[in-house]
Image (cartoon, rainbow, N blue to C red):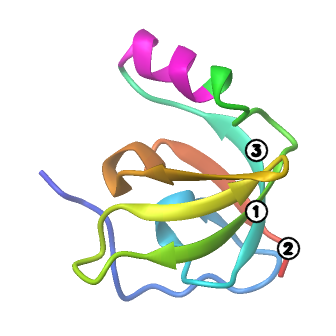
Amino acid sequence: MNTMNKHHKLTIGEEGHLSDLRRGQKCVVLSLHNDSASLRRRLLDMGITRGVNIEIKKIAPLGDPVDISLRGYELCLRKIDMHGINIKVVA
């Protein structure tokens, strides 16, 4: 069920999922895709929209949840929710 690749490291200019990033990396959101309309609405309400810049701030010791920074505040997300966010690495 978990298809996320923990060992793949995205570099600047590459596209992938928000869940593929490591601590300190920055990206821009390209799109959201998931099966749950309520989750999509919640992510949009929290400011995760196309074009927003996100930085990975902290990752919990067991890898889940992840603390991200966007629009001047920090937010914790589960990796499974992050996998539905397509991004492009900028730093």
- Where is residue 69, by image quadrant? bottom right
Q: Main secondary structure of the magenta part?
A: helix
Tell me how far mark 3 sits from mark 1, CA to CA: 7 Å
Helix, strand or loop status at disc 3: strand
Is 42 covered by the magenta stretch?
Answer: yes
Q: In this figure, what is the number of numbered marks? A: 3
Question: Where is mark 3, residue-wise?
Answer: 30
Above/below status of 24 relative to 76 = below
Tell me how far mark 2 sits from mark 1, CA to CA: 6 Å
Question: Where is mark 2, residue-wise?
Answer: 90
Q: Which residues are magenta?
A: 36-43
Task: Check disc 1 and give the amino acid type.
Answer: Lys
Helix, strand or loop status at disc 2: loop
Q: Position of residue 34 (x, y in %)?
A: 43, 28
Q: Position of residue 86 (x, y in %)?
A: 62, 49
Tell me how far mark 3 sits from mark 2, CA to CA: 12 Å
Helix, strand or loop status at disc 1: strand
Task: Check disc 3 and give the amino acid type.
Answer: Leu
**Residue lying farthest to the front in this orientation:** 73
> Which one is nearer the viewer's eye here, 69 or 90?
69
Question: Where is mark 1, residue-wise?
Answer: 88
Is 21 covered by the magenta stretch?
Answer: no
- Where is residue 31, by image quadrant? top right
Residue 70 numbered mark, or none = none
- Do the residues bearing badges 2 and 1 touch, measured as CB atoms within 8 Å? yes
- Classify mark 3: residues with Cα within 10 Å, few (<14), some (14-19) or many (20+): some
Quarter of the picture holding the C terminus:
bottom right
Task: Check disc 2 and give the amino acid type.
Answer: Val
**Residue under the point 37% across and 17% down:** 36
Q: Position of residue 21 (x, y in %)?
A: 56, 75
- Do the residues bearing badges 3 and 1 touch, measured as CB atoms within 8 Å? yes
